[in-house]
Image: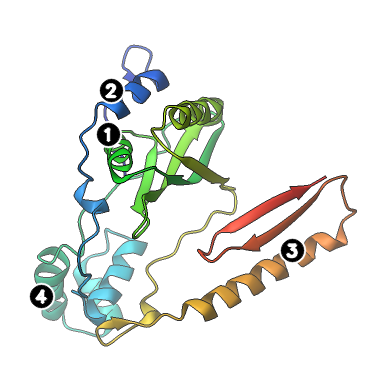
Amino acid sequence: MGRITSDWFDSCKENWFFPWNDWIREVQTQTTDLPYTLMETKSYPVLADETDIQMLMKLEKDATTNLSEIAKSLGISRQLADFHFKNHLIDRSLIEDYPIFLMRYGDESQVMVLFIMSFHDYETLAKFARSLLDKFFIITMGKVLKENAFLMEVFLPTIEFRKFIDALSKMAKMKLLRSYKYVIQDLRIRRRQTISGEFFKGKSWIYDHETHMEMLQQKVSKHLLKFEEYPKPSSSVTAKVNNQGLLKQEVKK
């Protein structure tokens, strides 16, 4: 998540400004080491147990929940909850920080957009990623394993979103990135969930990708059936789920 700093804030006018060309130049001057949270490691050991996962789920719902309430809801003692919190969640860095989300733009029209960014090589990926660490409009970032690509979620005033896309297009022409895709989220129906603790048993995750993708495709198909009740427009929209679990839309005239 990008830090909220005063670099792009006008304290006299009390509003944000967006120097996109300055950002493009900044990308070119960054170092080529990825932020540690985006680095791939040789292995991914499981550092949690079932109690840790259940506690994390409670804290994701409400980070201010006290340990006594968590212990009671999980049916464990306060002392055991305290042990897991200090010795596992904190000491093992299962909790890294508590980011705070702020509605930054007052009554302005705003958009939240999910991007998939692809790069020519590791160096350009690292430079781009590092340039975002202090950008207040970045909500989340995550690297795609074994690829020079990552996902990011941005939150911008609608009037600035087009300029942001223009900046990305300029960087694509400059070979600072290879390509990008995005999906605009509908904030009226946006939902979040905790980590899926029901798939964690013993000390390992249980996940069947093929079954998950089949279920996701069924949900998408069921959702699209609702549109058959309405008159067909001059252009038709079809949707499908790719093997990464992302909804793609194709428009046909």
Q: Is residue 110 left or right of residue 252?
A: left
- Look at the numbered discs 1 and 2 and tell me whether their residues touch, using CB distance below 8 Å: yes
Q: Say if residue 134 shows up in the picture.
A: yes
What's the distance in space between the residues labelled 4 and 2, CA to CA?
Answer: 40 Å
Q: Is residue 19 left or right of residue 185?
A: left
Q: Secondary structure at mark 2?
A: loop
Q: Nearer the viewer, residue 142 or 104?
A: 142
Query: What residue is drawn where x is 35% and y is 19%?
Result: 22
> As displayed, is residue 111 above or below residue 252?
above
Q: Which of the marked residues, 4 or 2, is nearer the chain's N terminus?
A: 2
Residue at the top extreme, as displayed: 12
Residue at numbered disc 4: 83
Q: Is residue 7 left or right of residue 177?
A: left
Query: What residue is drawn where x is 39% and y is 66%?
Result: 194
> Where in the figure is residue 151, as x and y percent of width and height?
41, 50
Name the amino acid, label 1: Asp
Q: Which of the marked residues, 1 or 4, is nearer the chain's N terminus?
A: 4
Residue at numbered disc 2: 7
Name the amino acid, label 4: Phe
Q: Quadrant of residue 44?
A: bottom left
Query: What residue is drawn where x is 20% and y is 56%?
Result: 96
Name the amino acid, label 3: Leu
What's the distance in space between the residues labelled 4 and 3, CA to CA?
Answer: 48 Å
Residue at the bottom extreme, as displayed: 202
Q: Which mark is residue 134?
A: 1
Marks 1 and 4: which is nearer the front? 1
Q: Which of the marked residues, 4 or 3, is nearer the chain's N terminus?
A: 4
What's the distance in space between the residues labelled 3 and 2, CA to CA?
Answer: 44 Å
Residue at numbered disc 3: 224
Q: Neighbour class for label 1 at 10 Å: few (<14), some, many (≥20)?
A: some
